[in-house]
Amino acid sequence: MISQTPFAVIGLLAALVFVKAFYTRRKHLPLPPGPPGHWLFGNVLPKSHAPVQFAKWTEEYGPVFSLRQGPRVWVIIGRYQAAMDIMEKEGASLIDRPRYISASEVLSGGMRVVVERAGDRLKRLRRVLHAQLQPKVAVTYEDIQTTNARNVLLDIFDDPNNHQMHVRRYAASVVLSITYAHPPTSLSSPLVRAVNLCLSRFGSTIRPGAWLVDTYPILQYVPGYLNQLKEWHQEEKALFDGVLQGVKNEMVTGTARPCFAKFLLEHQRDYSISDGELSYVAGSLFGAGSDTTASAITIVMMAAAKHPSAQTRVQEELDAVVGRERLPTFADQPMLPQVTAFMLEALRWRPVSIGGFAHRATKDIIWNGYRIPAGASVIGNHWAIANDPDTYPDPQKFDPQRWIDEQGRVRDDLRFCTYGFGRRVCPGQHVANRSIYINTALVLWAFRLRENLSALIDTSLYAFSDTANMHAKPFEVIFEKRIEEETIRGLVAGGD
Ligand code: HEM
């Protein structure tokens, strides 16, 4: 009988050669193409409106292009399908964030979820966030959201010129209620002012290129260089600890109402959360959830004032389903596909997180014959993806009907990346969507929004702040009442 051994050995050797060749070939695959740069320093990143420049480079270099900045590689994705292939399917290799010495390690003491690196702490923090923000818990915030959104209607009656401020007040109030059971508040309250200050410091620190130490880490050892950030961290920590202490005191006296902070304190051990992490995860929810939600609702209002016929379609639906004698509620949403479509289109038309947040590749990722190397910062550019003509035909057109299927229902085969990607997708998305829905339904039910023809609304990106989460600069809207003010006040007072 012929021995099988030599064949087995040959087979094994052939397999080894094949595997080695496979990996060698992978290693030699090129980076995605991109604009030429300096041989040593690489590309100069755009100083302002980076997502817009990146979208132009997408047109020129394709759905996935790369940039180099010193030793750092950036890969930018500007088309929907490529974003799905890379950010979603390869999500496990993109769970990490780039290292932010300035915004994360120093300013946030390494505890802010949004800039947390992959690892055990991220897993624990995301678990606890999920516990309190998942869909079945999000519905329990209905009363907080409804009460605050109804107040927006009254605020608009009282002071229509400050509509953007009313929406910011809504978002701040909702997040503080959910997090600390804080009573409805105003933008001028010392707490809101203090957390907004922390938020703007974080926003300015994380801007690409704001702190050179993020490209050249050696700078962290320069005496005094990071002092400003260290001071801000101490202030931020004291603020977050102070608000949390308020909840602890209420728990001692038995007066604490249910909220995220109380839940965390009661389950601190189950989720293995340290005191510092607990204080920060609660404190930084404001930063993640308040500004973003306010921006989204304001974009809905801008879209309505600018697109009268799309607005009419929503109002016809509201009149047919809700009528004019009661206020729209969450229970109405399944019967209001036009309201949902309108908000989805507004979120695509002017995406709040316009450039997307950077993820970091922990392994080489191969896409279409290109290699995204381990260590690269990978960004799904929301602005370019929103303008992908293959997924959203005629993308510049504001057209809520693209979200509606032939049966008149909201399409379930179309998506946009409003809330980011993969394993870092926004954990607050269910709460956010519910906030945007209830405000859209109530405002468009109560008012006809119009543009003042002598103060036209600028909807270009230059009419928004050049920040990671963009905000519309002040603009005027005429709020014509569709329902009598007394009727609305009566319905709000009666809780109907
Ligand atoms: C319209 C409103 C909102 C928008 C547009 C938005 C968008 C985003 C985006 C794009 C990300 C990054 C995703 C990625 O890395 O790919 C994110 C992360 C995050 N969001 Fe939101 N968000 C909103 C509201 C909220 C709310 C209401 C909360 C909480 C109450 C929240 C909490 C967070 C947190 C904690 C993270 C960090 C997650 C991580 O890095 O793992 N967001 N959000």
Image (cartoon, helix red, strand yellow):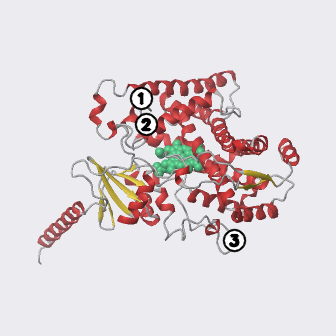
Any part of residue 278 in sight: no
Estimate the x, y position of residue 219 in percent, counting from the top left: 29, 32
Local SS, label 1: helix
The residue beneath circle 3 is: 408
Q: CA distance from mark 2 to mark 3?
A: 45 Å
Quadrant of the snapshot with the N terminus: bottom left
Q: Tell whether 16 sits left or right of 153.
A: left
Q: In the image, which disc is placed on residue 205?
A: 2
> Quadrant location of residue 412?
bottom right
Q: CA distance from mark 2 to mark 1?
A: 9 Å
Any part of residue 327 in sight: yes
Task: Please report whichever mark, 2 or 3, sits nearer to the chain's N-terminal start.
Answer: 2
Local SS, label 2: helix
- Disc 2 + disc 1, Cβ < 8 Å: yes
Q: Nearer the viewer, mark 1 or mark 3?
A: 1
Q: Tell whether 138 sits left or right of 8.
A: right
- Disc 2 + disc 3, Cβ < 8 Å: no
Residue closer to the observer: 264 or 410 = 410
Q: Is residue 8 above or below residue 327?
A: below
The residue beneath circle 1 is: 229
Q: Is residue 331 above or below residue 103?
A: below
The amino acid on which the numbered mark 3 sits, given as a three-letter code, is: Gly
* Residue at 36% in and 41% down: 99
Local SS, label 3: loop
Task: Please report whichever mark, 1 or 3, sits nearer to the chain's N-terminal start.
Answer: 1
